[in-house]
Amino acid sequence: MSEKNKKIKEHEDIDLQEVYKDWCEFGATSILSIGKYEILFRSHNEYDASLNDIVEDKAIQYLNNGAVCTNEKLQYNLVYDEECGSILGCNFTMPSKHAWLGDVFSTLPYGIIKKNKTGLGATTLELNSKRNSIIVVPTRALAYEKAKNSKIPGTNKYKVLYCGGKLKDFNIPSLSEYLTDETITYKKLLVVADSLPRTLEFIGDANYKDFFIMIDEIDSYQYESHYRPNLEKVVDYYFKFPQGQRCMVSATIGNFSNPLIKDEPIINVNFTDIDARVITLQPSNNPIVTAIGKILQLRRDFPNDKVLVAFNLVTRGILPIIESLPEELKIECSVLCGDKSKPHVKDYLYEVENNNLPTQITFMSSTYFVGIDFSERYHLVTVMDATFPWTLLSTDKLQQIAGRCRHKDGLLSETIIYNTFLGTSNYINYEELGRDIINDATILIELSSLFDKAKQKYPKLIKTYNEIYLEDIVKSSGRNYLGSSNVKLVRNEDDKIKIAYFNIDNILIQVRLLHTTYSDTLNLYSELRAEGNKVNYLSFKNENTHILDEVNKRIAVQKEKTDKELIDAFILELRDKHTLSERKTLAQNKRNSYTNKVGVFLDHFIELQHYIPFEPLVSTLPLYDNQRQYRQFYNTVIFWALDNEHPIKKAWITSFIIGEKYTGAEIEEKVNAIWSGVLGFDKLSRKTAMLIAHEYFAVLKQTRARIGGRIPQRVYEVISLNTKGLPDEHVEYIGSDVNIQRKIRL
């Protein structure tokens, strides 16, 4: 018997079981606060008849502000770093493998919540919590479904507001109307990454404290940031919220490069038991061809079953598979993908409705690897090609994709088709590699900062410093490491160069997968087995590598046509705007949704609209769509746009007189007088000087003439000083005091 209870017994004849009841009602509380972890305990007291004593047991009431349900006794443990004397994370165990987060918490804790399993209802819990919330979800379709299902019976109102672009057949109230509606007690805003800045701008910085922000599926940002730059901005806004009013959630969370995210508290969800998957592995030298064969086999053996193909490669992966299928199967195909790829799969484009696969054969890119659930059973075929490193997936991501099936009986079957990376390194120190990549990015930040300081201190030395230069730094920051794809290391945010941490995460993920999981066909087998899965490993499939050549040619032609249609459509939209600022804003907004040729067109338009009038510009730009051609055209425009009093322009006009004839040696001398004498570049050879003259300074016609009474020799007559036939009218001139050395692209 405890000393405390002994003293009670000495003074009064009290029933300890009654004392226990009183203490349960008026139990004491205590707080454990270490670093960014806060746990509020309440003393639970139980009468132990064998000891004739009251046994005290502390139960968690709040974990990082997350309110624990009163009927749940949370099993937890803290993970300490003994060397640093800090907490690495807090683990808690779900009461059963079928439990929801809403069975444990009435509000989500703050920090990073690693669910380790899909379908735990984190979004639903936050939508039902008694507080104002902003929930950032990965797809517009998911936001739409959640918002649509929140309609208040008998009204035209919704408990949850979707903040984003217009959606078909969904009447969305305005944000101001929703926020001022007093009948909706707790405001719930569902946004995608691209819509978050506009939403927060409307709410205003002063009102951040009134909302809890939840970023769902944060791991997808690491996989997709290199082609969705706005994802990095989401984290910028995330850290504007107070620590206790923010969380990031995902079933699979790896390592982060961003020191702010690394410093967030981690809540790790454990399970007493997780269902093992039955997986068939099919290594191949050509995963696309093997995937075609697998689909044909499934449709032949199971004609009534649905098939879902997960492959993060649309125009060079999903489309070749579809176009290689028989016509009767093509009509059964649909594609779920992001906005950038939709124009190229328009014939097969569908959306998810009522949590069902839209057709018998459905393909999905990484946009749909998270967030979307399917309530029916199907055969899952996941395809990866190490030739395109961004298609490779960790075992966690493979689990997440498999978890999209919410049917109680699970998948009908799961097949993973993949190849391996040939350039494997024996040993890679990933921590050191991460530091090296961040150092590479830091060099660019220091460079931009140095020029900024020089501009302030030496304005005559550095006469131009503008956003074009910042964007050039970003564009030039693309690097690949140890076989990874080319990924930009920095970004331009608020006219400052910043580290693109998610892109660096993406590089490290690619390198780790290339050199570990996919360095040998058996490595994936071993990793999946180690996680408790039942894995059937098939023998290596050696496919004909040329079987898709004709199909790919047809797709390339169609892609070219689609790109032209998109560019023509954008030109129409741009034509409706009447100021440079309006057109720039529209082009920038469109730019974030497109890559390759369409995105390049928009980049070039933004860059040159300051010089060339609209109509000549949009009719000319499509002619210069490859990098080399555009570089030459860009330089020509820069020289053309110079004020007539600019020293370069003066030298140009006086050196090349229309109607005059010059020898090759004379042209070499005149070009170098400008190129190395005025601009300060390295002296050019005869051949290069002639090329520069033709490109930038003058239209030259080769002929023969007597020079100084000598026998006829090869000379060049100046026909024009406008090498690209640019219009006489300028939008803006480059002033006579501007040093164009840094504008020229060599």
Image (cartoon, grey):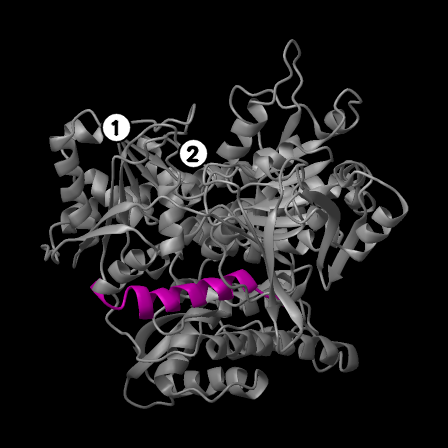
Amino acid type, callout 1: Gln
User: Residue 675, relative to residue 558: is it above or below?
Assistant: below
626 left or right of 386 in image: right
**Residue 680 visible in this rendered orientation of the protein:** yes
Residue 557: image x %, image y %? 25, 45
- Amino acid type indicated by mark 2: Asp
| Nearest to viewer (mark 2 / mark 1) | 2
Residue at coordinates 59% horizontally, 53% vertically from top-left? 76
Residue 733's disc is none
Please tell me whether residue 312 belongs to the stretch shown in magenta. no
Q: Residues within 10 Å of mark 2 (few under 14, many from 20)?
A: many
**Label 1 belongs to which residue?**
360
Instruction: Single out the residue that lies furthest toward the right.
Output: 11
Q: Quadrant of residue 448?
A: bottom right
Q: Position of residue 268 (x, y in %)?
A: 55, 54
Q: Return the residue nearer the eye: 9 or 94.
A: 9
Residues rendered magenta in the picture: 498-521
User: How many angstroms separate mark 2 from mark 1 (CA)?
Assistant: 17 Å
Q: Which residue is mark 2?
A: 373
2 or 1: tag closer to the N-terminus: 1
Question: Could you say which quadrant of the image residue 573 lies in?
Answer: top right
Secondary structure, mark 2, is loop
Front residue (pair 19, 507): 19
Q: Is residue 723 above or below residue 358?
A: below
The number of discs equals 2
Give how far across and how far down residue 701 sits, in percent: 35, 70
- The answer to whether 629 is drawn above or below residue 444 in the figure is above
What residue occupies the far top of the structure in this picture? 154
Q: Residues within 10 Å of mark 1 (few under 14, many from 20)?
A: some
